[in-house]
Image (tube, helix red, strand yellow):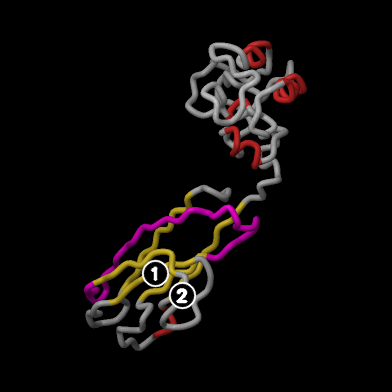
Amino acid sequence: SYLPGEKVSVSMTIKNQGNISAGAFSTIYRIGDFTSCTPEGSQQKFSSNSLAAGASQSFNGSFTVQSTTQAGIHPVNVMVDVYCQVSESNEGNNRKGASYEVLNLDADTDGDGFINRVELFVGTDPRKACALTNTANDEADDKWPPDFDDDKAINIGDIGSFTAPVYRFGSSKGQVNYSQRWDLNADSVINSLDINVVENFFGRTCL
């Protein structure tokens, strides 16, 4: 599953199931369905000079989920010989479909009390509700938005992080001391409202 802004990797392998070599052709994948030998909206195209009988060839691509993509299941379709350049005994086996899921930005996927949209804004992992260990600041990415030192507990240290080692309280977007990580209500200002969010979780721990 993916969130808007994340990259989806696409891997595909094609095989010449015939008994003669195929000449030059192209392979593409796209988000959506194919309707003809000249499909529109391809995400990425791969060119092949030839493919021997019985031989296989693999391609790897990727695309970024757009911010306008709605939550739900979406298709990814691959088509080989997209312009119908190669004469084949079976033209019906040139397509293969798969799907990927886009998560709802307004859902709380990891159940930590913060919707995905806010977690993406502050930079925490929307799929993981808790740090892996209770050792402070030993992980590259934070998981629980109010747990600034990733020690699995919300305490005075998390509240103190608004003013030390960098004094972030009262800052707004564009100022040097502003950081989205401390802007827990995602309003581009770090103030008492953000500290209130931490206080609402004060004394709690995660597993």
Between label 2 and label 1, give the one nearer the viewer. 2
Q: Is residue 182 above or below residue 110?
A: above
- Say which residue appears at 68% left-offset and 18% top-offset: 154
Q: Is residue 155 above or below residue 140?
A: above
- Say which residue appears at 36% left-offset and 65% top-offset: 13
Label 2 close to label 1 by CB (< 8 Å): no
How many dots with numbers?
A: 2
The residue labelled by disc 1 is 28
Quick check: 46 left or right of 178?
Answer: left
Residue 27 position in % (x across, y down): 35, 71
The residue labelled by disc 2 is 40
Packing grade of label 1 (10 A; few <14, some 14-19, many >=20) is many
SS of the residue at dot 2?
loop
SS of the residue at dot 1?
strand
Q: Residue 159: which quarter of the image? A: top right
Q: Residue 126: which quarter of the image? A: top right
Q: Amino acid at mark 1?
A: Ile
Q: Is residue 91 above or below residue 194?
A: below
Q: Which residues are magenta?
A: 49-75
Residue 207 position in % (x across, y down): 65, 25
- Indicate which disc, 2 or 1, sits on the residue closer to the N terminus: 1
Q: Residue 181: which quarter of the image? A: top right
